[in-house]
Image (tube, coloured by chain):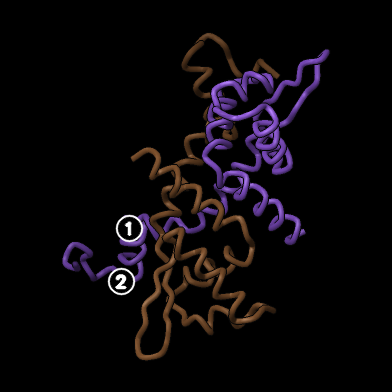
Chain colours: A purple, B brown
Amino acid sequence: MVEQTQTRLDLTFRALGDHTRRAMLERLSRGELTVSELAAPYRMSLAAASKHIQTLERAGLVKRTVRGRIHYVRIDPRPLERADDWLRAYERLWDTRIERLAELLRHPDNNPSDSE
Amino acid sequence: MVEQTQTRLDLTFRALGDHTRRAMLERLSRGELTVSELAAPYRMSLAAASKHIQTLERAGLVKRTVRGRIHYVRIDPRPLERADDWLRAYERLWDTRIERLAELLRHPDNNPSDSE
């Protein structure tokens, strides 16, 4: 189960590691698009765009529905939520307000504004 | 500038797309480690572990300091924060409470509990 979660996160983060795929997700966050609409703004072949869409599909980030001869793509936000859950576990590392508050709770006599 | 941000995010998300590298970051979040300490728990050569550390370095996720003959590695959380900023822009897609609240603000006469 842990292994499955790890593999899913691997696929999600790898799918997000490309600016064209992130731009596709950005557009899909506003609503469903056909594969042709999704591919249109990019200076690439439909085949190259399809490959990006397949990578997003494998990561579970998009779902494809075929109606007639048209392929529709919509976003599935669940893997984004899991990726965000992973990242938020490290929030204390960058959110110094949280870190300072934790420090104050550990040593209530220290005034954090005294420290550098 | 936008392009640089995109390239950085590419490197960050790709570096996170591997469970060994995520496990390394998890251990580094608790404090600095030497390269050998960092490599020790994994069934892989020091060379393979070093390659993972280099990928993390290129993404700016870790910094290396050499003291004497020992290489020390520590986490730099800033790229994690930027990745999280990107993901949080999509929070409304999975956080249905936020979506329902927004819906209620748009149409105050609709009681969301009436809808399915």
What amino acid is at disc 1?
Thr
Instruction: Classify the position of the C terminus of chain A by image quarter.
Output: bottom left
In the image, residue A5 above or below residue B38: above
Residue under the point 67% across and 16% down = B115
Q: Are marks 2 and 1 in contact (CB under 8 Å)?
A: no
Residue B79 locus on image (x, y percent):
42, 54
Q: Residues within 10 Å of mark 1 (few under 14, many from 20)?
A: few
Residue under the point 40% across and 74% down = B64
Instruction: Report the side of A97 relative to B32 (left or right).
Output: left
Among all residues in the image, which is located at the extreme right? A68
Residue A100 locus on image (x, y percent):
31, 61
In the image, residue B116 above or below residue B12: above
Nearer-N-terminus badge (2/1): 1
Instruction: Report the side of A61 relative to A70 (left or right).
Output: left
Res. B57 image quadrant: bottom left
Residue A66 locus on image (x, y percent):
80, 20
Q: Give A113 or B16, whichever is nearer the viewer.
A: B16
Q: CA distance from mark 2 to mark 1?
A: 16 Å
Instruction: Report the side of B52 relative to A9 (left or right).
Output: left
Instruction: Classify the position of the N terminus of chain A by image quarter.
Output: bottom right
Per the image, label 2 sits on a secondary structure element best described as loop
Q: Which residue is mark 2?
A: A107
Res. A95 image quadrant: bottom left
Q: Give A46 or B22, whichever is nearer the viewer.
A: A46
What amino acid is at disc 2?
His
Q: Give B2 or B31, whichever is nearer the viewer.
A: B2
Q: Give B114 or B97, whichever is nearer the viewer.
A: B97
Report in which chain the residue with disc 2 lies.
A
Q: Which residue is mark 1?
A: A96
| Labels 2, 1: one chain | yes
